[in-house]
Amino acid sequence: MAEVEGVVQRILNFQNRYAPVAAQSTVPWYVIAVIHNMECSLDFTLHLHNGESLRRRTVNEPVGRPKTGQPPFAWDVSALDALAYHGFTTWSDWSIGGICYKLEGYNGWGYRAHNINSPYLWSYSNLYTSGKYIADGVWSDTAVSRQCGAAVILRRLSEHGAIDLASPPSSKLPDTAELPEVPYALFASSDPKQLEKAEDLQRLLNMFPSISLKVDGIVGPRTSAAYKTVTGKYLPGNPRGE
């Protein structure tokens, strides 16, 4: 608890640093803060993408970010690029469920294959015990995450009264021009990034009146029809061809 409390107090001290990025990106400041903690241990000299130095473009996944500008990068510039890269700037569901979904995707969906609740969210809680990737693609059943999960930090911020997770910021309808355009498919993609993109599209479409889609990543007839209702065109590859 002492460690959790220390992270929370540092985040609250940095709130003004997150505010300009939150205003420009429309991502709540506390979502940016927990990503910053997970990826950079709240160090403002590191890329929000993956915790590498701002003195150069990112070397590891995602590689070569930001693509524009010249290093060394300002933290705000890099943070905005990271949020856009991961689809946070077009996301509108800032309920606790929507936040956790995007945060898990930020780190990756690999823990689901091991039937483990992602420690990126749940480490230091009763929803996680062990199991961890100890290197890229290297899994250990016995390794235990030593970093406090993002959901635990969010809960503690809420307990302090610093944020209100029960009443997320009001959101406007997504800009139809910024909806992810994914190819029509009758099966969910085996590519985690493509699957996440398809599920993001379904979640965003569900924000429009009279649309109710199962968020399963299967962008077939129903999703394509909903996409046409909103944008006036079917998804690429729809056999109807309109």
Image (cartoon, rainbow, N blue to C red):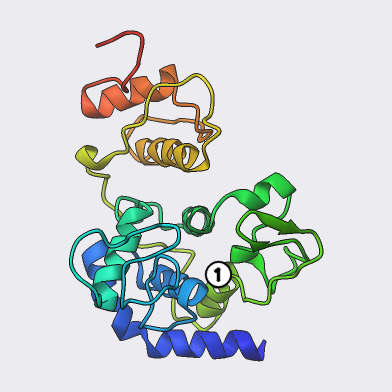
Badge 1 marks a residue whose secondary structure is helix
Report if residue 170 is visible in the image. Answer: no
In the figure, 120 relative to 185: above or below?
below
Front one among 70 and 8: 70
Please name the residue shown 59% across and 64% down the image: 121
Q: Quadrant of residue 184?
A: top left
Q: Is residue 169 left or right of residue 214?
A: left
* Quarter in which the N terminus is drawn: bottom right
Give the x, y percent position of residue 105.
Answer: 50, 53
Give the x, y percent position of residue 188.
Answer: 53, 28
Q: Which residue is mark 1?
A: 150
Q: Quadrant of residue 126?
A: bottom right
Give the x, y percent position of residue 109.
Answer: 58, 49
Give the x, y percent position of residue 19.
Answer: 28, 77
* Quarter in which the C terminus is drawn: top left
Residue type indicated by callout 1: Ala
Please name the residue shown 35% across and 72% down the image: 29
